[in-house]
Image (cartoon, helix red, strand yellow):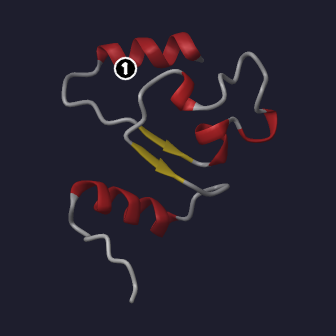
Amino acid sequence: MRVAVEKTYQALPAPKIVTAAGACAISGGPIAGHREVNDGAGGVLAVDLYIPGCPPHQLTLLDGLLRMLGRIKHRIPA
């Protein structure tokens, strides 16, 4: 899949935003360390947004995208 991901990335117009959603996309999941996995998307491309989960919940996806776009401010609880 590395070649397919790289070709797809190159074919996209700018601005390019790379999102890794789910444990397998982030770190390789249960098959991390295998040569074909590349230990997640970060081993192939520069990832802009990591969304955790296995699989990630729909609201987690939405929250991550909105935070990246600046629609939700990051607040640290007091």
Location of residue 47 in the rendering, given as x and y in whole percent from the top left corner: 42, 35
| Vertical order, 42 against 24 (above or below) | above
> At 65% across and 47% down in the image, what residue appears?
23
Q: Residue furthest front?
A: 78
Q: Which one is nearer the viewer's eye here, 62 or 35?
A: 35
Location of residue 60 in the rendering, given as x and y in whole percent from the top left corner: 48, 65
Mark 1 crowd level (few <14, some 14–19, many ≥20, 10 Å Cα)? some
Residue that label 1 marks: 9
Q: Which one is nearer the viewer's eye here, 67 or 1?
A: 67
Left or right: where 38 falls relative to 50: right
| Vertical order, 76 against 23 (above or below) | below
Exactly how many numbered labels are in the figure? 1
| Vertical order, 29 against 76 (above or below) | above
Q: Quadrant of the N terminus?
A: top right
Q: Quadrant of the C terminus?
A: bottom left
Location of residue 69 in the rendering, given as x and y in whole percent from the top left corner: 23, 55
| Vertical order, 25 against 4 (above or below) | below
Q: Which one is nearer the viewer's eye here, 77 or 32?
A: 77
Name the amino acid type tagged 1: Tyr
Location of residue 50 in the rendering, given as x and y in whole percent from the top left corner: 48, 47
> At 60% across and 49% down in the image, what residue appears?
22
Left or right: where 13 falls relative to 18: left
Q: Which one is nearer the viewer's eye here, 77 or 52?
A: 77
- Secondary structure of the residue carrying tag 1 is helix
> At 80% across and 40% down in the image, what residue appears?
30
Left or right: where 24 falls relative to 62: right
Image quarter of residue 52: bottom right
> At 67% across and 55% down in the image, what residue appears?
54
Left or right: where 10 falls relative to 30: left
